[in-house]
Every structure is written in structure tokens, then in C-alpha cells.
Image (cartoon, helix red, strand yellow):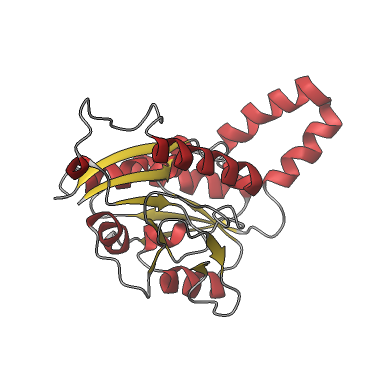
Amino acid sequence: MRLKILACKVFFREISLIAATSKNYLDVTYIRQGLHNTPELLRKVLQEELEKIDAGDDIYTYKSRYDYKERDFDAILLGYGLCSNGLAGLCSKKYPLVAPRIHDCVALFLGSHEAYQNYFNSHSGTYWYNASWIENSSFMPSEESEKALCAIYTERYGEDDAKYLLEQEWPDSYDRCVYIKWDELDFPEYEKYTENAAAYLGADFDVVRGDSGMLEDFINGKWDDERFLITRPGQKIAADYSDMNRIITAE
């Protein structure tokens, strides 16, 4: 298959690793991390990209000098969770959209929605780390990040407001820093980074072994209905509140 992928940059290493050996043709565009903090902006950015791809005007996407239909895409893959409803309303008029049935991208690093939910049920105050998150996140709680952000906030808003704003980055609800480790991506320096962050923040530290299986199936076109939503051209993605395991639906 020929597949277009629009994905958050927190998947850069993982998608790149799988894409290197996939039998599918893949055209990947990575979007800056952090847009999920403002779901309306995430939806706007992704919908604009979809419309440009539909029209053949997206500057990041492969375009042949010849209009051969056999070189068109079979589907567009969205490398996101529902992300606070950031995916709700997205639509391509020309292509099927494929999206994993997950609330949070962490589920793709762990291998399933169930794996993420099981850990969350017993450790709800978890902040997740891995190589791609540390490299591409707009803010990862740590001594280095906090000092850098403190300097910026102090310059802009003054010392008292800077202290308050930093407290919002690491609220009391977080009490654990967890590093997701894939066998295929071994970065002991990032595991140590997470351990140091936990010590600095006074949080517990844990290492959880991830699973590349769901992301591999996503990229390689193994789309069962239980784990992936496939829309028809013209259909919109919507949150599915009737079934907590399905998470998203088409309308």
C-alpha cells in the first residue's frame, strides 16, 4: 500500500524505525509536539494538512510530475490518540483516515490501550518519558527543563508568577516518572535522565517495557476494527462515549 502518515513528533524514532523495514510505501509528516495542549489548534492544524493533501497542495507530501492514479495514497494514517478530542471532527474528502483507538499516544508505546489502562489504574499520577518524548517534547519535567523555563518565565512575568507557572507544569497529581523502554531502541542515557528527573522532583521512578506491536500493525496495514478506526472519504472522526474501549467512531 501507499500510505500518508501525519504524526506527532513524539513518534519520530519509533515510526522511523518501523518505516525503515515496512513493505508499504510511506510518506511521513511529523507535526510539532505540544498542540494537544490546545485541542482546537491541533484539530485546525491537522484539518488544514488533510485539505492540502486532498488538493495535492501540501508542500511536505510526495507529488509525482505525472498524474498516475496508481501512485496515489490508499489511506492517511493519523499518529495520534484522541488527545482531548483534538482528532474529533477531522475529515478527508478524498482518502480513508486510519486512527488507533486510544486516548493517549502512550498506549502506542506500550502496545495497546489495555496495557496503558492497566498501568494507569494502579499508578494514575504517572508522567511518561521515552527517547522521542525527551527529544521532541515542548517540556519534560526535569531539573534542566525547569531551570530553563524558570529563566524564561521570570524574564517575562516576574519571579512570583514564574514560580506559580512552574507549579502548573508539575501539579501535585503527578508522583511517578516512568521510562518506556523498547528493546529495539536502547538509550540508557534517557533512562538515566528520567531517573534523575524523578529524584529532582521527589517522585517515584519506574521502567516499563514497551511493545512495538500495535504501532507496527498500524504502519503495516493490519487494521482490525477492535484497535483501529477506518473512516470512508467524507466521514468525520468523532469521540465514542458509548463504549470506553472503542474511544472513537466515524460519523
Above or below: residue 155 compared with residue 189: above
The answer to whether residue 108 is seen in the rendering is yes
Residue 204 point in image, percent of width and height: 55, 59
Residue 250 point in image, percent of width and height: 49, 66
Residue 203 is drawn in which quadrant? bottom right
Return the residue found at the far top.
155
Above or below: residue 4 compared with residue 99: above
Q: Residue at x 41, y 36 (%)?
A: 55
Taking depth in this image into account, of 159 and 58 the one nearest to the observer is 58
Residue 122 point in image, percent of width and height: 55, 74
Q: Is residue 207 left or right of residue 81?
A: left
Residue 201 point in image, percent of width and height: 62, 47
Residue 226 is drawn in which quadrant? bottom left
Taking depth in this image into account, of 207 and 15 the one nearest to the observer is 15
Q: Residue at x 49, y 52 (%)?
A: 91
Residue 219 is drawn in which quadrant? bottom left
Taking depth in this image into account, of 59 and 9 the one nearest to the observer is 59
The answer to whether residue 186 is seen in the rendering is no
Return the residue found at the far bottom.
242
Above or below: residue 9 compared with residue 85: above
Above or below: residue 212 compared with residue 193: below
